[in-house]
Image (cartoon, rainbow, N blue to C red):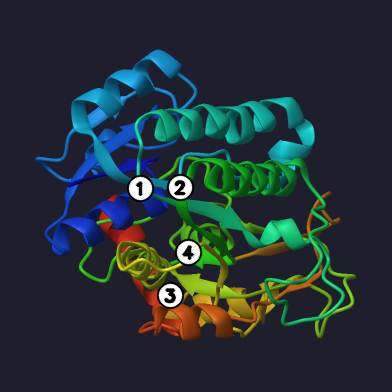
Amino acid sequence: MTILVTGGAGYIGSHMVHELLDAGERVVVLDNLSTGRRQAVPAGVPLIVGDTGDEALLASLMRTWRPEAIIHFAASIVVPDSVRDPLGYYRNNTANSRALLAAAVDAKVHHFIFSSTAAVYGNPAQVPVDEDAPTQPLSPYGTSKLMTEMMLRDAAAAHGLGYVILRYFNVAGADPKGRAGQSTPGATHLVKVAVQAALGLRPHLEVYGTDYPTRDGTCVRDYIHVTDLVRAHSAALAHLRAGGGNATLNCGYGRGYSVLEVVEAVKRIAKKDFPVRLSARRPGDPAMIVADAGRIRRLLGWKPMLDELDAIVAHALAWERRLIGT
């Protein structure tokens, strides 16, 4: 049986493809290459270049490959960009996901795993935040993902589609084997940007907001290694294949680090200092968000293997050095 990975040429999607191949699965990738890279797709894996909103392409893809499951990563993900271009985010993240869900229902796809986000919680009243907390996104990015969650639940109730929604906290790091990593030009992920500053690829690092109600005034986030994250998807797929029920699950470690703590970790591991500029807050950024990840551990038996900030930074650093050939 084939697994369709949308956004499989991107950062997390390419790690997922490697994870599936390692498990002996048959994979096909759909990616429009707007941020993904053709070379990120492993040799031998079919890459369909196109958009998840292209209904004719989706119908053809479903007829040709007859996927048993869809793992849906394709999305725009930059919070400040979503504030500047909300309609673009609703098109790419919500309307296109609606088209993909319709194609999945028409093709009688059995399982659907959706890449959602902790941004659906906004500024939670209680931290760590669990899956039953109110969803009050602060940005069109978070809202676009929440709307897709709602569509997926409704489609599942109407058509019997099995699903797992995974709400990611801050994904970082790279494949420990050096096969994949964050390669998107202009990426805004803190760990990658800090690593680039340490390697002299950026003149400085910008820190947005130092007046948040946190221990050092900067935003606090729960960082999860990308390899542990894709293993959570594999566990979700196994759960659905075994007849497990639909679920919405947090993907994080339950431990938060501030922006300045991440910066200091990068400086220490890279053994390089670099300039840090302090700037005003960006719209849409919550002060602190940390996962209550008990449910995913109980339901899926998921056990993280790389849940240390130093490991995340070290693998991101190794990948960035690989990209620049040092």
Disc 1 versus disc 3: distance between alpha carbons?
34 Å
Could you tell me which residue is drawn at 61 percent across and 84 percent down?
254
Q: Quadrant of residue 292?
A: bottom right
**Which quadrant would the C terminus be assigned to in this image?**
bottom left
Disc 2 versus disc 1: distance between alpha carbons?
6 Å
| Label located before the other in sequence (4 or 2) | 2
Tag of residue 161: 2
Give the residue pinned by disc 4: 195
Disc 2 versus disc 3: distance between alpha carbons?
35 Å
| Label located before the other in sequence (4 or 3) | 4
| Label located before the other in sequence (1 or 3) | 1
Q: How many marks?
A: 4
Closer mark to the observer between disc 4 and disc 1: 1
Q: Residue 312, can we see it?
A: yes
| Label located before the other in sequence (2 or 3) | 2
Disc 4 versus disc 2: distance between alpha carbons?
41 Å
| Amino acid tagged 2 | Leu
Could you tell me which residue is drawn at 76 percent across and 41 percent down?
140
Tag of residue 110: 1
Q: Position of residue 32 (x, y in %)?
A: 39, 27
Q: Nearer the viewer, residue 36 or 188?
A: 36
**Element type at mark 4:** helix
**Element type at mark 3:** helix
Q: Nearer the viewer, residue 1 or 175?
A: 1
| Amino acid tagged 3 | Ile
Disc 4 versus disc 1: distance between alpha carbons?
40 Å
Give the residue pinned by disc 3: 312
Q: Nearer the viewer, residue 313 or 118?
A: 118
Taking 187 as reference, is 104 left or right? Answer: left
